[in-house]
Amino acid sequence: AQSVAQPEDQVNVAEGNPLTVKCTYSVSGNPYLFWYVQYPNRGLQFLLKYITGDNLVKGSYGFEAEFNKSQTSFHLKKPSALVSDSALYFCAVVPGGYQKVTFGIGTKLQVIP
Amino acid sequence: NAGVTQTPKFQVLKTGQSMTLQCAQDMNHNSMYWYRQDPGMGLRLIYYSASEGTTDKGEVPNGYNVSRLNKREFSLRLESAAPSQTSVYFCASGDRSNQPQHFGDGTRLSIL
């Protein structure tokens, strides 16, 4: 069975500082990994995905994520946080192939002006 | 640029009532999904459809039925609503069966 963990319910960071939102996963075989962002009263927006290839994946709005196979992690990062980045962030995983995506419970990011 | 459209946005039902949540996408995606979002639970897959004419159960299918009416539309039906089905429901679509890409803005459903 596959699973994904987001160990922090909330992350607080000062505007302009780098941010990291953590995600670890457990899956058999090669994982497909995703990050999504959700703003209040809106649906999820796709940020980026890792399928194969370069371990550093770049996505929308200046976000990037690093796939680390040995640590089974896929942490979301941004060099300089904006107040507008404040939102709920979801990590998701699926084993390679046509199976069902599993979402984490989400991490609330609060960027403090 | 509609993307994924869900109707209604809000609904209050009484226990035992039935209703259908509608979802339509205009991106010509093959795959469509229904999720529910509950506090502390993340998103849980209810049903999905990998292509027109096919549907499959997700993690929490009990109490729900779905119809993939055509490539654009994927509806979710509650036959006899229960308070445990109070949730926010999201429809999503994607061009591959294991990669939901676009989400609607959700239907907030309360069952009394």
Image (spheres, coloured by chain):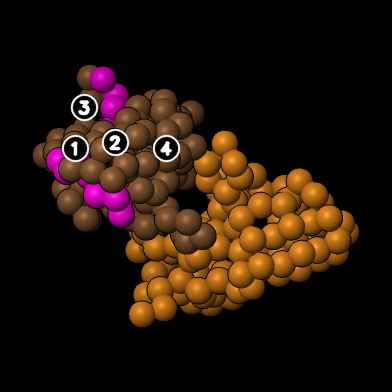
Chain colours: A brown, B orange
- CA separation in Å, label 3 and label 4: 20 Å
Q: Earlier in the sequence, mark 3 or mark 4?
A: 3
* Residue B99 relative to residue A61: left or right: right
Residue B56 visible to the viewer:
no
The one nearer the camera, B69 or A58, is A58
- CA separation in Å, label 4 and label 1: 18 Å
Give the image quarter of residue B2: bottom left
The reply to the same-chain question for discs 2 and 1 is yes
- Amino acid of disc 1: Asn
- Amino acid of disc 3: Asn
Give the foreground label among 4 and 1.
1
Q: Can you tell which mark lies on residue A107? A: 4
Q: Earlier in the sequence, mark 2 or mark 3?
A: 2
Give the foreground label among 1 and 3.
1
- Chain ID of residue with mark 1: A
Q: Is A108 rendered above or below residue B106?
A: above
The reply to the same-chain question for discs 1 and 3 is yes
- CA separation in Å, label 1 and label 3: 23 Å
Point out the image quarter for the C terminus of chain A.
Answer: top left
Residue at 86% from the left image edge and 61% from the top image edge: B14
* Residue B68 relative to residue B1: left or right: right
Q: Say what secondary structure mark 4 lies in.
A: strand
The reply to the same-chain question for discs 4 and 1 is yes
Q: Can you tell which mark lies on residue A1? A: none
Q: Position of residue B31 (x, y in %)?
A: 44, 63
Give the image quarter of residue A69: top left
Q: Are marks 2 and 1 in contact (CB under 8 Å)?
A: yes
* Magenta segment includes A6: no
